[in-house]
Amino acid sequence: MESVLVRYRNLIILVGVLFLQVLGLAVQVKRGNDLQNTRLIRIWAVSAVTPFERGLVWIGNSAGNLWHDYVYLRGVRTENRELKEQIEQMRLEQVRLSQDAAQAHRLQALLAFKEQFVAKTVAAQVIGSSGSDLSRIVYIDKGENDGLKADMAVITADGVVGKVLLVYPSVAKVLLINDQSSGVGVILEKSRLQGVLRGTANGEVTLERVMSDEQVAPGETVLTSGGDQIFPKGLPVGTVTQAGKGKDLFLNIRVRLAANLGKLEEVLVLVEKRQREATAEDVGHTRASDILAARLPSVPDKPPAAATPAAGTSLATPGTAQTSAAHKTSTTQKPVPAAGGAATPAKPQTPSSNPADAAPEQSKPAPNPPAEPANPPAKSQPTDQDVPN
């Protein structure tokens, strides 16, 4: 080792000096534009390290993609199977609900029930309020000129708001349902219990006229019952938040309204309601099995089998058919009366001279000649009574 260093000492010193000189120039020399100057040594360092960094980033991205695309998707098969089972359960539930709906339509048609629905609404904007905590009233920018009348329902996309109290030419006053003097006929969605929704002095809403022996669970949806003849049946009102025993024999039920009455900006006024009577044409007669058969995959129909001749029978050829037809005609032909009144027997038809037609007959026993049948009919033989004197 020492001999090599001693032998190439001058060359090693020269290479070291050159390296230090280049390194010094790289540290001192700056390269770049006017906005930013970068030393040449940094450019060399970045150029040398960048390929390794790109390789590491590519390896990391490939490993991440492999994990997400293959390893992580191992649980997707189980999730897919569970989702398919849920879809089947939902299909069966939909079939059951369809049957219940069809039965309800049949009962409506039988009892001649009438259903009210929203036919026409007028959009209005809230322009003011009463400014008092005792009365909860808002003003809208539509009035009598727009077709509004008193006791018309006011709703939003979320739920019921109130009713029109007073109408002016271009402005209307709306009484909110959380006012103390308001009242809305409602029904609970699941238990089908009916009551009256009223407001309180502090702005809350309670459900009255529900007996204390009934069971009302928090979270049940409250809908309009249509008994007040103002709101159509089935509009959302709110949700039960608390249910407990109250005064006398009724429950104390608190309701959270579906519509935010404190942030009203636009409302819809129900200016026209229509009634539709259930008819027998509206009732469907589709069975649950038919619905399932239409949705589930079916077995393809079996192709029709080719007609095969029965045992002991043979297919007739055209020549045989023609010969049989000629023989039948000759045996059943009646005599034609002559001019003098005498009946002359019909001439027998000669067999066809076509070789194709005669070929099948050669392989069969010769039948009786058509001119001389074995048992001729009585009418074919002339009698003495038919010959004139």
Image (spheres, rainbow, N blue to C red):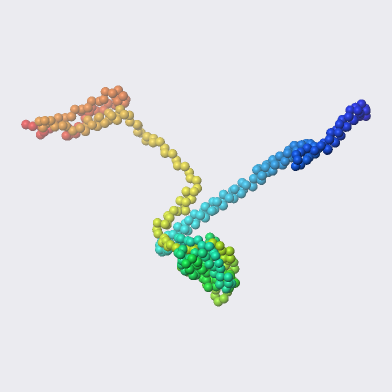
Determine which quarter of the picture holds residue 331.
top left
* Whether residue 156 is situated above or below residue 39 in the rendered picture: below
Q: Residue at x 78, y 40 (%)?
A: 38
Q: Residue at x 69, y 40 (%)?
A: 62
> Which of the image's four quarters has the N terminus?
top right
Q: Position of residue 323 (x, y in %)?
A: 27, 28
Query: Is residue 189 something that shows in the picture?
Result: no
Say whether residue 4 is left or right of residue 245.
right
In front of the other: 126 or 7? 126
Determine which quarter of the picture holds residue 374.
top left
Q: Position of residue 170 (x, y in %)?
A: 49, 66
Query: Is residue 67 something that shows in the picture?
Result: yes
In front of the other: 56 or 291? 56
> Which of the image's four quarters has the C terminus?
top left
Q: Residue at x 49, y 64 (%)?
A: 142
Picture mark count: 0
| Residue, far bottom | 248
* Whether residue 333 is situated above or below residue 132 in the rendered picture: above
Q: Position of residue 128 (x, y in %)?
A: 55, 67
Q: Position of residue 231 (x, y in %)?
A: 48, 66
| Residue, far left | 389
Q: Residue at x 47, y 61 (%)?
A: 121
Determine which quarter of the picture holds residue 336.
top left
In front of the other: 104 or 140? 140
